[in-house]
Amino acid sequence: MTNTAALDFCLRLSRASAALIRRLDSSLGEVHGISFSDFQLLFYMQRGSGGRIRRDDLAERLALTISGVTRALQPLEKIGLVSRQPDPNDARIGYAVLTKAGQNLLQDAHLTAMMVCEELLKETEGEQLELLATVLAQIAGMNVSNTRENHDE
């Protein structure tokens, strides 16, 4: 791949990411009152054991700092979608916990997000998506086998 091709790919990826986020923000906001960032937080929390995840693990999955996760969780805590839970054995560890209201909202929002993504990618073959998912995981520094658990339903 030439340097120009790599730059062109990254520029297109950035534009596609912005368009995807704008579309998901709009749909999730209109229907469920949450942003795509909120959805991602809830989505990864639900994947934790019992709807609970360590905040540093959540930060890693979202490519945020722990303080960034804390700031992002605060509005969701205020509206009752998530709560905090300390670790009884280690005061340094804090968990983010999905409440029942958060679980219910996520279940509905998940369907909306899936519909938006399916619409955006309706012209794309499954094999292309697999290849692109691998490339995106490499860019993000993710282990591809770890990303599978988050997408299999």
Image (cartoon, rainbow, N blue to C red):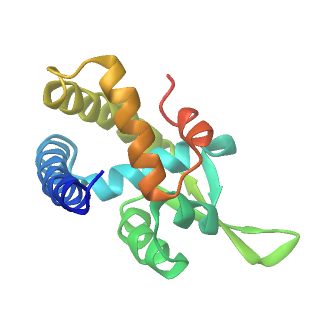
**Pick the front one: 143 or 105:** 143
**Pick the front one: 47 or 121:** 121
Left or right of 118 in this view: 133: right
Q: For the point 16% across and 40% down, which residue is it?
A: 31
Spot the residue most to the right: 89
Left or right of 86 in this view: 148: left
Instruction: Give percent across and percent down for residue 94.
Output: 68, 70
Left or right of 85 in this view: 19: left
Instruction: Give percent across and percent down for residue 49.
Output: 69, 43
**Residue 40 visible from this viewpoint:** yes
- Which quadrant would residue 10 be assigned to in this image? bottom left
Q: For the point 39% across and 31% down, which residue is it?
A: 131
**Residue 101 visible from this viewpoint:** no
Please determine whether, in this image, residue 129 is positioned above or below residue 40.
above
Instruction: Give percent across and percent down for residue 136.
Output: 39, 47
Q: For the point 84% across and 75% down, which residue is it?
A: 90
Left or right of 50 in this view: 98: left
Q: For the point 52% across and 37% down, which residue is it?
A: 150
Please determine whether, in this image, residue 57 is positioned above or below residue 74.
above
Instruction: Give percent across and percent down for residue 29.
Output: 16, 50
**Pick the front one: 10 or 140:** 10
